[in-house]
């Protein structure tokens, strides 16, 4: 663990990592790394990798009021039969900056990446939990916030599995308004992931937003406790909609090439 101070001083602590923190292992499962502080800024490398066949990479946890990941965070299974580990980023305000890489990919199965905030999550970097090129399944990525979730155009999400089952990306904010940039990111992700957007309030797809994914074998699921409003274009190979109310505005397009399920109530 890397801690900025004792518990009674934590609220005014600052952790800045511009070097390398590692708990990687050559012959055993990757170790555990924790960064704790009021403000945590990573511009360096944090790793809990493993190179051991059949092993699973370690766990990385970063917990802060304000958290900026602008470097590289890695819990990778680097051997052919090694699995990715788990990365958990928790805070009030979390930013994964453009150019950053957060990776739990595996030589076998991909691992887990969890980004949980209580106020705002902003994603602009690369998140990777892919399965191995010779076998293994894609992992899972969750980008969530009790408040606001921003997915910027520079975001890349990859949970592909060339020889296995594609993984999952969950977006789980309070309310969400999808603009053109976010829709483009989701379109790209659907080439290698099942994408679920689950909001506790309203989900709105703007008129300039287009999700147009032709990849067979992935599904877009849109869930809202209140209302889903589509004013743009949603066209995928598999689509599930579930909400108390679903509004398809004049001029909008909602289409599924294979599976289209609408649940309203």
Image (tube, rainbow, N blue to C red):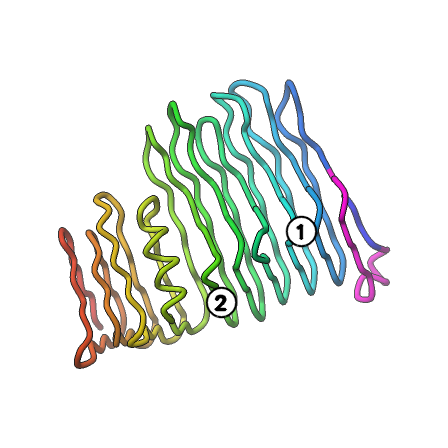
In the rendered image, the residue lying farthest to the left is: 258
Q: Residue at x 25, y 58 (%)?
A: 212
Give the quarter of the figure containing the C terminus: bottom left
Q: Determine which of the numbered discs, if any, sits on residue 114 in the image.
A: none
| Separation of marks 1 and 2 at Cα, in angstroms | 18 Å
Instruction: Please rate how many residues cluster around mark 1, counting C-alpha atoms within 10 Å: few if below 14, some from 14 to 19, many from 20.
Output: many
Q: Determine which of the numbered discs, if any, sits on residue 62 in the image.
A: 1
Residue 64 horizontal/vertical position (percent): 70, 59
Instruction: Please rate how many residues cluster around mark 2, counting C-alpha atoms within 10 Å: few if below 14, some from 14 to 19, many from 20.
Output: many
Above or below, 79 against 244 in this view is above
Q: Residue at x 40, y 51 (%)?
A: 169
Q: Nearer the viewer, mark 1 or mark 2?
A: 2
Above or below, 251 against 2 in this view is below
Residue 63 horizontal/vertical position (percent): 68, 55
Residue 240 horizontal/vertical position (percent): 23, 59
Say left or right for 123 vs 207: right
Residue 137 horizontal/vertical position (percent): 38, 33
Q: Is residue 13 magenta?
A: yes
Q: Is residue 150 magenta?
A: no
Q: Give, as a single range, the part of the protein colored magenta.
A: 5-21
Name the residue tied to disc 2: 149
Res. 232 image quadrant: bottom left
């Amino acid at each position: 663990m890397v801690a900025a101070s004792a518990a009674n001083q934590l609220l005014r602590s600052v952790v800045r990592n511009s070097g390398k923190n590692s708990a990687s292992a050559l012959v055993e499962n990757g170790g555990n790394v924790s960064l704790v502080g009021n403000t945590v800024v990573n511009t360096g490398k944090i790793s809990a990798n493993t190179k051991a066949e059949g092993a699973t990479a370690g766990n990385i946890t970063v917990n802060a009021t304000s958290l900026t990941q602008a470097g590289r965070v890695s819990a990778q299974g680097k051997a052919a039969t090694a699995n990715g580990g788990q990365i958990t980023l928790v805070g009030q305000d979390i930013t994964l900056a453009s150019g950053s890489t957060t990776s739990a990919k595996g030589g076998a199965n991909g691992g887990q990446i969890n980004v949980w905030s209580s106020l705002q999550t902003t994603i602009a970097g690369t998140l990777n939990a892919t399965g191995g090129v010779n076998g293994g399944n894609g992992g899972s990525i969750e980008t969530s916030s009790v408040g606001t979730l921003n997915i910027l155009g520079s975001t890349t999400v990859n949970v592909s599995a060339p020889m296995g089952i594609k993984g999952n990306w969950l977006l789980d904010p309070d309310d969400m308004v999808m603009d053109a940039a976010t829709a483009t990111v989701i379109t790209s992700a659907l080439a290698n992931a099942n994408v679920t957007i689950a909001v506790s309030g309203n989900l709105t797809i703007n008129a300039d937003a287009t999700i147009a994914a032709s990849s067979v074998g992935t599904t877009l699921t849109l869930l809202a406790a209140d209302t889903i409003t589509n004013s743009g274009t949603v066209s995928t190979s598999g689509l599930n909609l579930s909400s108390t109310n679903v509004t398809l505005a004049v001029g909008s397009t909602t289409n599924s090439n294979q599976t289209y399920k609408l649940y309203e109530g």
